[in-house]
Image: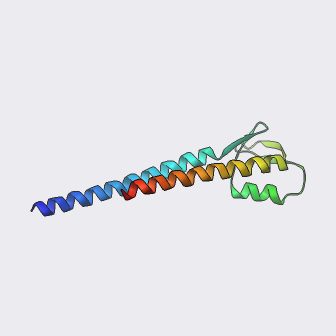
Amino acid sequence: MSFFIMSINSITDQLKTATDYQQNRRLLRERIQTDLLLPYNGGLFRVSPDLISFLNAWDADTIYLEDLYDNPIEVKRLTLLDEARSHYQRVMNRWHQEHEELRKIRRL
């Protein structure tokens, strides 16, 4: 009988750990999505591979982009591209590191 109770407790602990991991993973992703916001020239942009690709492919030096608040913002394309690239890489590196820490904690 005590083996059965220990087994149930073990299963319960494993389920709690898995649930905590999923919740912490979701919260981390939400925080990272917020961290990807980049203010530029009075506007606010979410840095993404799409934005970086667009800025990289366009050929005009100055363009107008719609920000998160639906405002047209004048953008110096190469300046925003450089800022977006470095910001994106910095946030993604931090996300990767923090995600790996969550995975390590889950395995303990």
Residue that lies at the very extreme toward the left in this rendered image: 1
The residue sitting at 49% across, 56% down in the picture is 100
Left/right of residue 37 with respect to residue 95 in the rendered view:
right
Splitting the image into 4 quarters, where does residue 56 fall? bottom right
Which quarter of the picture shows residue 22? bottom left
The N terminus: image quadrant? bottom left
Q: Position of residue 24 (x, y in %)?
A: 44, 50
Rendered residue at 70%/43% (across/down): 38
Where in the figure is residue 28, as x and y percent of width and height? 51, 49
Q: Nearer the viewer, residue 75 or 96?
A: 96
Q: Which x, y percent locates residue 6?
A: 17, 59
**Residue at 43% in and 51% down:** 23
- The answer to whether 74 is drawn above or below residue 26 in the figure is above
In the image, residue 91 sits, relative to residue 57, either above or below, namely: above
Query: In the image, is 69 to the left or to the right of 80?
Result: left
Q: Quadrant of the C terminus?
A: bottom left
Q: Is residue 34 left or right of residue 101?
A: right
* Residue drawn at point x = 72 percent, y = 58 percent: 50
Rendered view: 76 above or below 108 = above
